[in-house]
Amino acid sequence: MLNKSGMPKIFWGECLAALVHTWNRSPSKTTGGTTPYQLWYGKIPDMSHLRIWGCMAYVHTQKDKHSSLSLHMERCTIGYPEGIKGWKFIIPKTRCTIVSKCAEFDERHFLYKLVDQDQTVPLTSTQLL
């Protein structure tokens, strides 16, 4: 997943969390064809929120975070927040993460594969601290 998305290796933890999130919602032979989520919670998981990890996303920004003439969306990439309905977004331009339920996805493109074309500076491990 990390290689396919083109994201830097510093995101291996986010990648692993997304893998576990997806894996727990996938049927397995070891669980008798059910999902670990279903065994734990006693109900079939809703998987409508799943997207290709690391794909390009456009998240709607808060009204107080932009002017009336600026874009109301920010280009970012996704992950899954723990215990919250929605997605976790990483915005390379501002080096921030946000959680939102409202976004548009382009699963054909990966933001970090376009970094060189757009002159966007990717995150480094020291910038995350």
Image: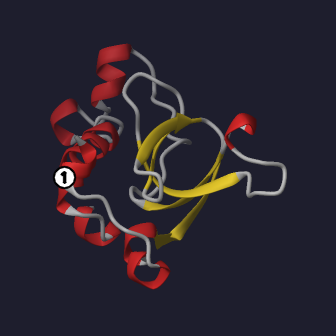
| Residue depicted at x 57% and y 36% | 100
Give the image location of residue 33, x and y in percent. Answer: 29, 37
Q: Which residue is mark 1?
A: 125
In the image, residue 15 sits, relative to residue 3, either above or below, namely above
Give the residue at the far right of this rendering.
Answer: 68
Q: Position of residue 4 (x, y in %)?
A: 30, 71
* Color scheme of the displayed model: secondary structure
Q: With respect to residue 94, does 28 lie above or below?
A: above
Badge 1 crowding class, 10 Å Cα cut-off, few under 14, some 14 to 19, many 20 or more, is: few
Question: Farthest bottom residue?
Answer: 117
Q: Nearer the viewer, residue 128 or 60?
A: 128
Q: Quadrant of residue 83?
A: top left
Q: Residue at x 31, y 32 (%)?
A: 35
Number of numbered tags placed on the structure image: 1
Residue 115 lies left or right of residue 9; in this view the side is right
Q: Is residue 59 left or right of residue 88?
A: right
Looking at the image, which residue is at 77% across and 48% down? 67
Where, by quadrant of the figure, is residue 64 drawn? top right
User: Residue placed at 26% from the left, 40% from the top?
Assistant: 17
* Three-letter amino acid code of the residue under disc 1: Ser
SS category of the residue bearing label 1: helix
25 sits to left or right of 103: left
In the image: residue 17, left or right of residue 61: left
- Residue 39 coordinates in the image, percent (x, y): 30, 20
State which quarter of the image contains the N terminus.
bottom left
Q: Nearer the viewer, residue 90 or 123?
A: 123
